């Protein structure tokens, strides 16, 4: 498909890559409407090139599946504030790789970059944490 058709899919929340990019990553649209390149580990700003804009080899792909393996509830000593962070990762051949510690405020954004597998995450978390995550990401 061409880039104009691809943009419509990005608006719907899908991930896309060019056929020539195989396994190097994909693009998604963030909450602010910016196109982000996700290299299977880190999100970065995507800069459209002329060849990408004119290409006819755009294709829809599945987002990477990531799992939330732990939730941390830390209180700031001086101000009594509660900070929540999530340890997320992806698995390859049964081994967890690409680990990230994500603040509660960033979890919803990460759910745009990757598919957060809540069914698998439930193996590591309690029911209350799973419900909070579902509420946070709007699942």
Image (spheres, helix red, strand yellow):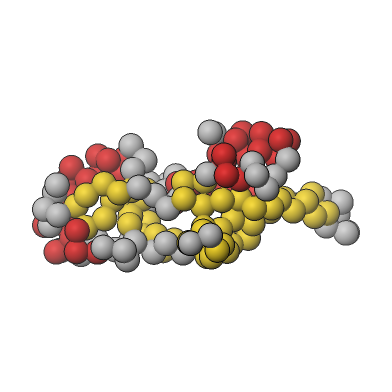
Q: Quadrant of residue 36?
A: bottom left
Coordinates of residue 86 in the picture (x, y in percent):
65, 53
Residue 23 or residue 133, whichever sits in front: 23
Identify which residue is drawn at 71% across, 35% down. Answer: 127
Residue 125 or residue 28, whichever sits in front: 125
Coordinates of residue 71 in the picture (x, y in percent):
71, 51
Query: Is any part of residue 79 visible from this angle?
Result: yes
Q: Tell me: 94 left or right of 60.
A: right
Coordinates of residue 77 in the picture (x, y in percent):
88, 59
Identify which residue is drawn at 64% across, 53% down. Answer: 69
Identify which residue is drawn at 24% across, 39% down. Answer: 8
Query: Is any part of residue 45 visible from this angle?
Result: no
Coordinates of residue 25 in the picture (x, y in percent):
34, 61
Identify which residue is drawn at 57% across, 39% down. Answer: 119
Q: Tell me: 38 left or right of 79.
A: left
Q: Give the farthest residue toward the front.
A: 93
**Whether residue 74 is situated above or below residue 8 in the rendered picture:** below
Q: Tell me: 50 left or right of 102.
A: left
Q: Quadrant of residue 95?
A: bottom right
């Amino acid at each position: 498909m061409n880039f104009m058709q691809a943009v419509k899919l990005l608006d719907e929340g899908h991930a896309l890559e060019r056929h020539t990019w195989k396994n190097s990553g994909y693009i998604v649209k963030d909450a602010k409407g910016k196109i982000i390149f996700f290299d299977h580990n880190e999100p970065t700003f995507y800069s459209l090139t002329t060849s990408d804009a004119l290409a006819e080899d755009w294709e829809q792909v599945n987002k990477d599946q990531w799992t939330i393996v732990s939730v941390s509830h830390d209180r700031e000593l001086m101000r009594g504030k509660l900070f929540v962070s999530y340890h997320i990762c992806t698995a390859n051949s049964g081994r967890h790789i690409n680990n990230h510690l994500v603040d509660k405020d960033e979890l919803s954004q990460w759910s745009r970059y990757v598919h957060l597998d809540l069914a698998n995450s439930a193996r590591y978390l309690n029911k209350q944490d799973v419900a909070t995550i579902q509420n946070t990401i709007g699942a």
